[in-house]
Image: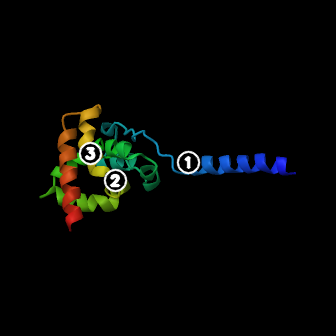
Amino acid sequence: MRKKIIPLLFLLAVTVVLCASAANWKSDKAFVYPDITAFNSSAAGKRACYVSAQEAENMTTRALVETVVTYPYLVDIYAFNSPDLWFHGAKSSLPMLKELCGRPDAVEKLREFPAGAQEDVLSPLYCATLIGCMERDAQQ
């Protein structure tokens, strides 16, 4: 009887460990945005580019940074009197930004992002602006 219990306990332990690690697994794939020029309105484009809270939670911080920085409508951050105005409003309407702000390594990954990614010329500017907004937001 004892010989049967030990292998069963071992299999149970392995199953528990595998289930626990699967629950903590995060994707390192950033969201792939559609071509926004294909939409008739910016509202339709923004709906197509929406990243749900669940999708954002299941990304690594690096993938989440890439998702935020490559968001086609991130340029709107410069359409306000200050980037902080856009940032505060966007945190409530963009779950990906809210999730990024909750990550302890977000600023570190934003600083690293332009150096190791396929970037456009605006990525370093976006990263610096987001870092500034996040740091000011943390001080309030």
Residue 73 appears in the figure? no
Is residue 49 left or right of 58 when viewed as pictured?
left
Q: At which x and y percent is residue 68?
A: 31, 46
> Residue beneath label 3, please?
110
> Residue beneath label 1, please?
21
Is residue 71 left or right of 13 when viewed as pictured?
left
Give the SS element for disc 2.
Answer: helix
N-term-proximal mark, 1 vs 3: 1
Residue at the left extreme of this rendering: 81
Q: Residue at x 20, y 65 (%)?
A: 139
Q: Residues within 10 Å of mark 1 (few under 14, many from 20)?
A: few
Q: What residue type is labelled 3?
A: Leu
**Is label 1 or label 3 in front?**
1
N-term-proximal mark, 1 vs 2: 1
Q: Residue at x 47, y 54 (%)?
A: 54
Distance from disc 1 to disc 2, alpha carbons, whole Å, reads: 22 Å
Q: At which x and y percent is residue 30?
A: 39, 40
Distance from disc 3 to disc 2, alpha carbons, whole Å, reads: 10 Å
Q: At which x and y percent is residue 43?
A: 32, 51
Residue at the bottom extreme of this rendering: 140
> Residue beneath label 2, please?
100
Q: Residue at x 20, y 56 (%)?
A: 133
